[in-house]
Amino acid sequence: DIRRGLIAFDITAVLPAGATVTAVSLTLNMSRTIAGNADIGLLRVLADWQEGQANASGNEGSGADADGGDVTWTQRVFKSLDWNTPGGDFFPAASATASVGGIGSYTWESTSQLVADVQRWLDDPASNFGWLLQGDESKPQTAKRFDSKENEEPANWPVLVVEYTAG
């Protein structure tokens, strides 16, 4: 099965209006993998989606049944709004790519496109739909589990670092 992740940050809650973004990096903790090294791309999402309440406790790799408001392969809001394309609506070129292997923390280093994404979201908050994490979908069994803010250990939560100059 193809698996993708979504992640978004409220940029306007932490950056001042009018700021100029100069560098961006994203660090995620991988807590489970069934495969070796893989390149994971961050692709800018083009449509709003909703983080629901479903939580696959225990064996997270199997997922959980979708509940009202969850995002799914075909719906950006379960039982309410469809993606235009199954699997998500996203810009086809990765804004950044990281090579990930075993369990541990990985950083998507700053690129001009990551900077452009975050600048766009700061200047136009209504366009902030976050990133989709996409691996090599042509190979079987390449799943990687990255921790989210629901992880019990704050040290394992996603970290977005944004450098900027005040406007």
Image (cartoon, rainbow, N blue to C red):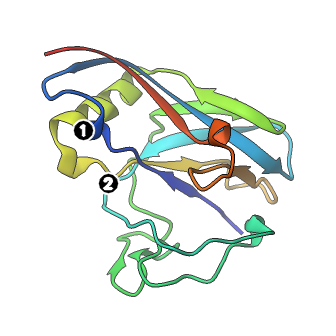
Out of 20 and 112, give the one closest to the viewer. 20
Residue 12: x %, y % from top left: 24, 38
Q: Which residue carries the number 2 mark?
A: 46
Residue 51: x %, y % from top left: 44, 65
Residue 124's disc is none
Q: CA distance from mark 1 to mark 2?
A: 18 Å
Q: Is residue 118 above or below residue 153?
A: above
Residue 12's disc is 1
Q: Quadrant of the C terminus?
A: top left
Please report the residue visible at 75 percent of the width from the left and 72 percent of the height from the top.
Answer: 62
Tag 1's secondary structure? helix
Please report the residue visible at 38 percent of the width from the left and 28 percent of the height from the top.
Answer: 113
Which amino acid, by three-letter code, is at mark 1?
A: Thr
Residue 104: x %, y % from top left: 78, 34
Q: Is residue 62 above or below residue 99?
A: below
Out of 11 and 153, give the one closest to the viewer. 153
Residue 135: x %, y % from top left: 65, 48
| Badge 1 or badge 2: first in the primary sequence | 1
Residue 63 quadrant:
bottom right
